[in-house]
Image (spheres, rainbow, N blue to C red):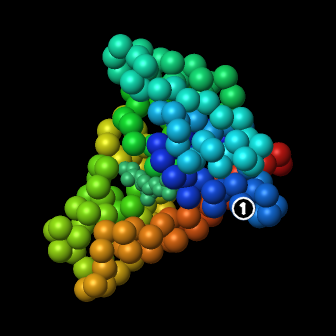
Amino acid sequence: MRIVVLVSGTGSNLQAVIDAVQAGDLDVEIAAVGADRPGTYGVERSAAAGIDTFVVDFKAYPDRAEWNAALTEAVAAYLPDVVVSSGFMRIVSPEFIDAFDGKYLNTHPALLPSFPGAHGVRDAMAYGVKVTGCTVHWADAGVDTGPIIAQEAVAIEDDDTEDTLHERIKVVERRLLVSTLASLAAAYAPQ
Ligand code: GAR
């Protein structure tokens, strides 16, 4: 199974995928890693791992439609079976999702459909829930919406900050992303 991973930042979830592939624990080919802006650590660490990288800079396009078209073309060039949004903080168009037959996987640091958006951890804490978690799902063109594949709960402790909670969620999130990709890859393996 060939994947293209999209990132906007640190890419620690991506690193878990890279590590699992390198360890021989995940039968996936990371065809490329792309970002929506220059200078992300996610792209830097991918290049260091010898993975093809590309940037389709959101700010370099006159409007969202043109950026979406350019992103679609850049990703499609790698002929992925699945595209993974791993901390990719941009909404893509329905045309993008269609171009990859809906095979657009997203991870989110909350128990969707609660607390979608860019601040899932902060919003859960602000609401005062005692349990949050993470979700891996097939993404549609909404904000963190689409059919859920896997979820796991994480308890919020009284002394948690957004950072400490997010880090604990990410530990679970990385494991869930890798295991979800492993299940999907098994379905792609030659019979
Ligand atoms: C992850 O927790 C991911 O779920 C979140 O960004 C973080 C990226 O971390 N994505 C969203 O909030 C999407 N709405 P990473 O760059 O260290 O992998």
Q: Quadrant of ligand 1?
A: bottom left
The residue under the point 26% across, 63% down is 122
The residue under the point 35% across, 21% down is 64
Is 96 located above or below residue 112 in the figure?
above
Horizontal side of residue 65 vs 73, given as left or right: left
Is 2 located above or below residue 71 in the figure?
below
Disc 1 residue crowd, few under 14, some 14–19, many 20+, Cα 10 Å: some
Amino acid type at circle 1 is Ala
Residue 110: percent from left, percent from top: 35, 63
Residue 191: percent from left, percent from top: 83, 48
Can the viewer see residue 79? Answer: yes
Residue 80: percent from left, percent from top: 66, 34
Residue 46: percent from left, percent from top: 67, 45
Name the one closer to the observer, 102 or 7.
Answer: 7
Name the one closer to the observer, 188 or 89.
Answer: 89
> Tag 1's secondary structure?
helix
User: Is the residue indicated by label 1 positioned so its CB lies within 8 Å of ligand 1?
Assistant: no
The residue under the point 37% across, 35% down is 91
Q: Quadrant of residue 78?
A: top right
Can the viewer see residue 81? Answer: no
The residue under the point 77% across, 43% down is 50
On the image, numbered disc 1 is attached to which residue? Answer: 20
